[in-house]
Every structure is written in structure tokens, then in C-alpha cells.
Amino acid sequence: MLERMSSSNFLEYRGCLFPAGHYEIDSLEYARNEFQVRKDDIFSITYPKSGTTWMQEILSLIRSDGDPNVSRTVPVWERIPWVEVTSLRKKAEAQPSTRFISSHLPVHLFPKSLFTSEAKVIYTVRDPRDILVSLHFFSRTAGFLDELDKIEDLLPKFLRGEVLFGSWFDHVRGWLGVRNQVNLLLLTYEELFQDLRGSVLRICNFLGKELNEAAVDSVVENATFEKMKDNTMCNYSTVSKKHFDVQKSPFLRKGISGDWKNHFTPAMSESFDAAYKEAMKDVNFKFIWDQC
């Protein structure tokens, strides 16, 4: 049994922890076994704290040809709803084609119908050390998490996969393992951070979406961290404090890469590096942080 971060706030489904209230076993079962993927669906898939909201915002702007009006008036979770979240599944299903849908699900829990479809998947990956730091601060924001005083207390849980949505290593290995079986574009948070415009163009090319220069400029301008942080439709400031208290810690905190260097002790780095090397030794793929 996975060690709980907070006793009654979670449910366990096939080895992964989910926030109770937002997720139900029946909804997760439905998503996995019954949700019908359409051939023109576009999925944005991430492990938590990997640039999820950023990619949702980029896709929203691309879909609207760079017009920011919808992004400024409709909550991001309604624009690109979650297939596995109980309250949002019907929104995902009811979208007219082409549907844009979000998910944190690992590959073994994802709708099975994906693998017999032509749907497109954008999988965004982030340096797990930065994810760990982001999760630590997120524990102050999220009402369903126990706030941890020390980031050192989160590291062993993270390495064992005793966190929301399970092991980062399993999540990444799983989706990398099917990248030749599904229509998948892999992007990293670091690529978005280093070259947002180039990343937007790659996404447009993958989606077969042609935008003129002015539209691309608008996507890039309105998907910057500064614009998103001030946008109440994606900074979660309008959500009830019992779910997300952004006064304790902003939902969109820094939007940078490499912040882990400001928080990891030498002992944490040593522990993480050993676990990473072992978990990823058989993965035939090199990320930008593997060179650092």
C-alpha cells in the first residue's frame, strides 16, 4: 500500500494516487476502458508540474489563431478539459471535433482506444528535479496536500513514486515506450523555456495548423509566463481556497528552468542522481538535463 501524504484526501487506483473528490474510481475506469478517442483528437499529456498549464495555454492560442480573447475569458480547464477528472469528463466528450483534451494519466491507465486511433499526443516532459521543487511549493497551495516544511522530506517519496500520479520514472518510461506506436510529439519544458517561438512552430507543424506571422507572434506573446501569471483564467486565483490557496504560494510560481539548484543539498543531489541513473539506464533517449 502506498504511503499516504494525507489520509482521506486520496484514492489509489492501479498503483497511482489521485486526489479524492476530483477523481473517482468509476471515472478512471470509464476513461481507461470506455472513453472513445476520435481520430482527430489532440491530447496534451504531462506528469504533474511539467508545464501542463503552459501547454494548455499554447494550444488554446493556436486553436484560436492567436486571438487571446477566449484565453482571457474562459478557464483553462474548460478550454482543454481533463479526460480523467470526474467533473470535466463530460466537457471533454461534448467538445466538437477537433477536441483538445488534457491528461496526467500514465500510459497504462490511458484510454485504450488511443492505440487504435490516429489521434495526436503532445507529451511534455520536465527535469524531475524541478518537478520536485515545484511539488514542494505546490503542497502549500493545494488544500488536499499536507504542507511539507522541508523539501528533503519529499525527495524519498518522489523517488519511490509515493506522490500524485505515481512514479515520474514510470510515467516517462511508459510514454517513451509507445512513442513509435502512437502519433506523438515529445517536447520538454526546457525547450519551451529556451525557445518558445520555435516550440510553437513545432507544435503547429505537428498539428498541421498554419498560422501567419502575426498569429504566431500573438501566441508567443500571450503564452509568456508573465502574461499567464496575470491571467485569472489560468492562474487558478478564481478557484476556491479549499482547493488552491494562491495566497500561500502562487499556482504559477517562477516559470524558470534549473530552480532545483537553489534547493537541492549535495546529499539530495547524490541520492537523486543514483536513483535516476538506475531507473533510466535502459531508456534509449537522452534529455537535455542528461547532459548537465
Image: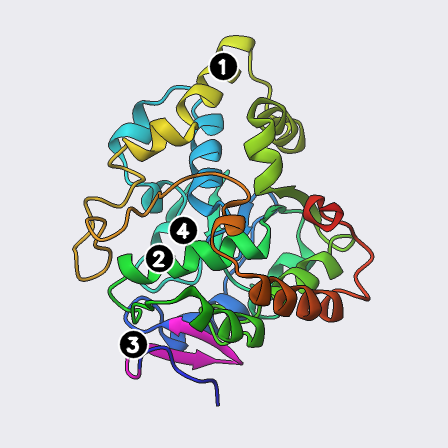
Give the CA distance from mark 2 to mark 3: 15 Å
Which of label 3 and label 4 is nearer to you? Answer: 3
Q: Which numbered disc covers residue 92?
A: 4
Q: Which residues are magenta?
A: 7-18
Q: Which residue is mark 2?
A: 138
Sequence order check, earlier mark of 1 and 4: 4
Sequence order check, earlier mark of 2 and 4: 4
Identify the residue at the far front of this view.
266
> Tag 4: Cα neighbours inside 10 Å, few (<14), some, or many (≥20)?
many
Residues marked 2 and 4 touching at CB (< 8 Å): no
Q: Which numbered disc covers residue 267?
A: none
10 drawn magenta: yes
The answer, for residue 65, to whether it is visible in the render is no
Give the CA distance from mark 2 to mark 4: 26 Å
> Tag 3: Cα neighbours inside 10 Å, few (<14), some, or many (≥20)?
some
Secondary structure beneath disc 3? loop
Q: Which numbered disc covers residue 217?
A: 1
Q: Is residue 190 left or right of residue 229?
A: right
Q: Amino acid at mark 4?
A: Ala
* In this view, 202 is above or below 23: above
The answer, for residue 182, to whether it is visible in the render is yes
Residues marked 2 and 3 touching at CB (< 8 Å): no
Secondary structure beneath disc 4? helix
Sequence order check, earlier mark of 3 and 4: 3
Q: Which residue is mark 3?
A: 9
231 drawn magenta: no
Q: Residue at x 44, y 75 (%)?
A: 17
> Tag 2: Cα neighbours inside 10 Å, few (<14), some, or many (≥20)?
many
